[in-house]
Each structure stands twice: as structure tokens, then as C-alpha cells.
Image (cartoon, grey):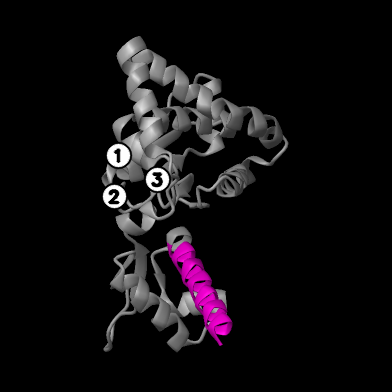
Amino acid sequence: MAGIKHAEAGAERGTRARVARLILEHGPITAAALGERLGLTPAGVRRHLDALLAEGLTEHRAARVPGQRGRGRPAKQFVITDAGRSAFEHAYDDLAGSALRFLAERLGEKAVADFARAQVAGLVARLEPALREVPADQRVRVLAEALSAEGYAASASKAAVGGEQLCQHHCPVAHVAAEFPHLCEAETEAFARILGTPVQRLATIAHGDGVCTTHVSPHALAERAKRGAEPGAATGQAVNTIHSSSKETGR
């Protein structure tokens, strides 16, 4: 009997971890959507969500549905908390932070920036040649899939102001990047090179945002820049719109 109970407890923990992972990757997300993805009953989902809420690993908020009117309470959406995100972090943050502080003290900030670029050089070397063969309108999606395979829980979508949006729902080096933004800057430069078009980082987990969000300019603008054409007033207006909505983007 003890063995059976132990196995059941292990299965319960495994399912709860899957629930937390889905919230991390796809949050904000409703309990109904979680149940559909995992094949769980509403009661089963609620049991796991209640446990995650009690542990402080997730939190909920009312879903905002544009244009929704009528009676009834809005559905709750669940998001990961900082504590929950930390549960997914690698155990080497302290060592990495100490190493970068040592590098900065001995060799200066430029050495840290060079190190950050070297860290993402492998990603560029692997993906840049392959993405040249991918149609321009598919490159952000392919990059998101590659980042997810490396633990960044990334997704791609169309941006409301034009272009596309790359979201990373998990950052394995967020705690270190909070102290050394060179890591985020080098990653952003790498995305622009890999995708072959200008990108703009709007939000980062390292700075306290819920998601690392990067706006990817349409490839048509990149082609115009190569030909030396000046962006029009509409483009400048779009950039301003992106800035003003950056806190909402990707959440």
C-alpha cells in the first residue's frame, strides 16, 4: 500500500508540474484551457490550481475580453509568479553572477559585453544559415521554436502595430541579466542578425516584466533600409505606439 501511495503522490506532483509549466508558457490562461490541454476534469484542474496558488507559485486575475458585456463574473486567468518562475530557474545564477562581477571588476564593462555576445554567438551560428532558407514570414515562428527547445518557452504572433512579436515566457538567466543587461542587449542584437530585420526589445523578465517581448519589424522595412529609403511618418508613429503599449505587450 505504501508503494501505491508513493506512486500516486509522484503522479500528482508530475501533473502539477505540467500545469505550472503550461501556465508559464501560455499564461495568462484559464482553467478551462488548462483542462483541455492536459485532459483533466474541471475538478482535477481546480485541485492543482488551488495547490499552486497556496504555494504562491501562481496567481489569478480577471480575464479582459474586449467588447464583452452582460452579466456573470469574468473567467479567471492564471499567471506564474516570481516565486513560480524561480522554481524553473537554473541553479547556477549565483555562480554566473559572481563570475561576471569578477570579470567587470578586473577587465571592465566591455569585457562583460564581449562575453555576452560570445554567449549568443553559438545561437547565431546555428540558426542564421538555416533561417536564410526559411520564408521571411515564417522566421519568427521558427526562431520561437528554436528558443523553446533551449528552455525559453517562446512564442510568435502578429503585432497589432504591424510586424511580429516574439515572446519569451521564461528566461534561464533572468536574475543575472537584472544585474548585467549586457545579456539582454546581446540577445536582441542576435535576433536582429538571425531574422535579418530590425528588432526592438519592449520588455524583459529581468526588469520585472511578465514576459520578454521583442517587436520584429516587417521585412519590407528592412529592404527599404538597405536601399537607403527613409522610413515614413507612419513608421515613426508605429514606433511610438509600440513604446506606449510595451507594458501590455506579450502579457
Against 20, residue 130 (above or below) is above
**What whole-number distance in Å separates the C-alpha atoms at marks 3 and 1?**
19 Å
Mark 2 or mark 1: name the one nearer the start of the chain.
1
Disc 2 marks a residue whose amino acid type is Lys
| Residue in front for this viewpoint, 30 or 152 | 152
| Residue in front for this viewpoint, 179 or 138 | 179
Question: Where does the image place residue 210, in percent across and percent down from the top left?
Answer: 33, 52
Residue depicted at x 32% and y 74%:
67
Residue 120 drawn in magenta: no
Mark 3 or mark 2: name the one nearer the start of the chain.
3
Q: What element carries label 3?
A: strand
**What whole-number distance in Å separates the C-alpha atoms at marks 2 and 1?**
13 Å
Residue topped by disc 2: 247
Q: Quadrant of the C terminus?
A: bottom left
- Neighbours of disc 1 within 10 Å: few (<14), some (14-19), many (20+): few
Residue topped by disc 1: 240
Disc 1 marks a residue whose amino acid type is Asn
| Residue in front for this viewpoint, 224 or 182 | 182
- Where residue 56 sits, quadrant-wise, is bottom left
Residue topped by disc 3: 212
Q: Is the magenta stretch mostly helix, strand or loop?
A: helix
Q: Which of marks 3 and 2 is in front?
A: 3
